[in-house]
C-alpha cells in the first residue's frame, strides 16, 4: 500500500520578510504519516516548511513553501508515481498576494525585495487560488496512473450541523472528508469522518483517525482486486 500525505500550512509571501500563513503546525499529518509507516505503508509526505517532521527513516519527505510549490510538487508526484491513497491535509491558502500599494507606489509581491515600513498605509490585493484538491485525481490521470482514494479535510469554527454538512458536501472531489472544528479542539482533537455526506466515524484523535483511514484504504484495494 502506497500513501501520499500533504500537511502543514502554505506561506504566501508579501515581500522578503512578510508572508500570509495559517494556524497549521503539521502535527496531525506527522502523526498520520508515522502511523501509516508503522502499519507497513510506503509513505510519501509533502510537508510544509516549518511543519512537524515525522520521526524515523521510513517516511519519504519533500517540502513546500507556497501554494504554487505545493501544486507543482503534487503534479510531479501524481503524474510519475502510482498511489493507492492521497490524504490531503495541507492547510492551503485560499488567496495569494496579487499586488501591493504603499506611499502611492505599486509593487509586485514576492521574496525579491523588502518593503519599506515607513508608509502610513499598505494596501494588499489578494487573488483567489484554485482548489488543489479538485485537481489531484486529474493529475494522476494525466500521468496514466490509477485513481487514488482521496481524503480531504475541512476545518470550521463553531459551525452548526447544517453548515458542517454543507462544507463537507462541497468537497465533492474527495472520496472521504475529515471534519474538525476549532470549538472542539480545546483539550482534545476529535475528527469526524464522512463519505457521501454521511458520518462514518467519530475519532478521538489523530491515531484513531489514522487507523480508520487505513481501514478504508484496505477496503478500496480489496474492492479493486475483486
Image (cartoon, rainbow, N blue to C red):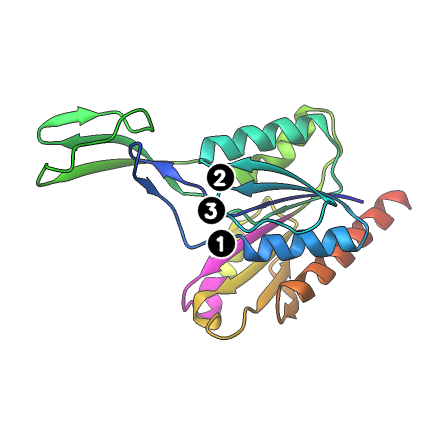
Please give the name of the residue rendered at 52% of the width and 37% of the height, measured from the top-left corner: 132
- Nearer the camera: disc 1 or disc 3: 1
Could you say which is closer to the camera, residue 65 or residue 163? 65
Tally the marks: 3
Q: Determine whether 61 is above or below 209 in the image.
A: above
State which tag comes first along the sequence, 1 or 2. Answer: 1
Q: Determine whether 23 is above or below 225 in the image.
A: below
Residue at the right extreme of this rendering: 226
Q: Determine whether 187 is above or below 92 in the image.
A: below
In the rendered structure, find residue 8 and report the number of the disc placed on it: none
Please give the name of the residue rendered at 47% of the width and 53% of the height, measured from the top-left corner: 24
Coordinates of residue 197 in the picture (x, y in percent):
60, 59
Query: Which picture quadrant has residue 18?
Result: top left
Quadrant of the drawing holding the N terminus:
top right
* Disc 2 packing (10 Å; few <14; some 14–19; many ≥20): few
Coordinates of residue 97 in the picture (x, y in percent):
31, 34
Residue at the front extreme of this rendering: 56
Please give the name of the residue rendered at 64% of the width and 57% of the height, measured from the top-left corner: 31
Magenta stretch contains residue 86: no
* Disc 1 packing (10 Å; few <14; some 14–19; many ≥20): some
State which tag comes first along the sequence, 3 or 2. Answer: 3
Query: Which picture quadrant has residue 128?
Result: top left
Horizontally, residue 90 falls left or right of residue 158, namely right
In the rendered structure, find residue 9 and report the number of the disc placed on it: 3
Q: In this figure, which residue is indicated by the disc labeled 2?
A: 131
State which tag comes first along the sequence, 1 or 3. Answer: 3
Q: Magenta residues, as a range?
A: 151-164
Amino acid at each position: 500500500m502506497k500513501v501520499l500525505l500533504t500537511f502543514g500550512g502554505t506561506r504566501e509571501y508579501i515581500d522578503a520578510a512578510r508572508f500570509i500563513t495559517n494556524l497549521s503546525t503539521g502535527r496531525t499529518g506527522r502523526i498520520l504519516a508515522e502511523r501509516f509507516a508503522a502499519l507497513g505503508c510506503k509513505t510519501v509526505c509533502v510537508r510544509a516548511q516549518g511543519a512537524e517532521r515525522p520521526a524515523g527513516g521510513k517516511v519519504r519527505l519533500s517540502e513546500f513553501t507556497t501554494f504554487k510549490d505545493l501544486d507543482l510538487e503534487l503534479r510531479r508526484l501524481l503524474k510519475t508515481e502510482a498511489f493507492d491513497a492521497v490524504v490531503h491535509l495541507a492547510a492551503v491558502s485560499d488567496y495569494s498576494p496579487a499586488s501591493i500599494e504603499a506611499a502611492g507606489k505599486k509593487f509586485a509581491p514576492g521574496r525579491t525585495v523588502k518593503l519599506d515600513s515607513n508608509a502610513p498605509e499598505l494596501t494588499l490585493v489578494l487573488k483567489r487560488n484554485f482548489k488543489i484538491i479538485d485537481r489531484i485525481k486529474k493529475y494522476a490521470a494525466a500521468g496514466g496512473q490509477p485513481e487514488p482514494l482521496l481524503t480531504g479535510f475541512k476545518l470550521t469554527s463553531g459551525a452548526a450541523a447544517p453548515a458542517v454538512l454543507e462544507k463537507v458536501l462541497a468537497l465533492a472531489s474527495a472520496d472521504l472528508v475529515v471534519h474538525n472544528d476549532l470549538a472542539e479542539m480545546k483539550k482534545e482533537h476529535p475528527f469526524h469522518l464522512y463519505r457521501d455526506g454521511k458520518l462514518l466515524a467519530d475519532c478521538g484523535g489523530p491515531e484513531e483517525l489514522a487507523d480508520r483511514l487505513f481501514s478504508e484504504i484496505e477496503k478500496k484495494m480489496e474492492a479493486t482486486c475483486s
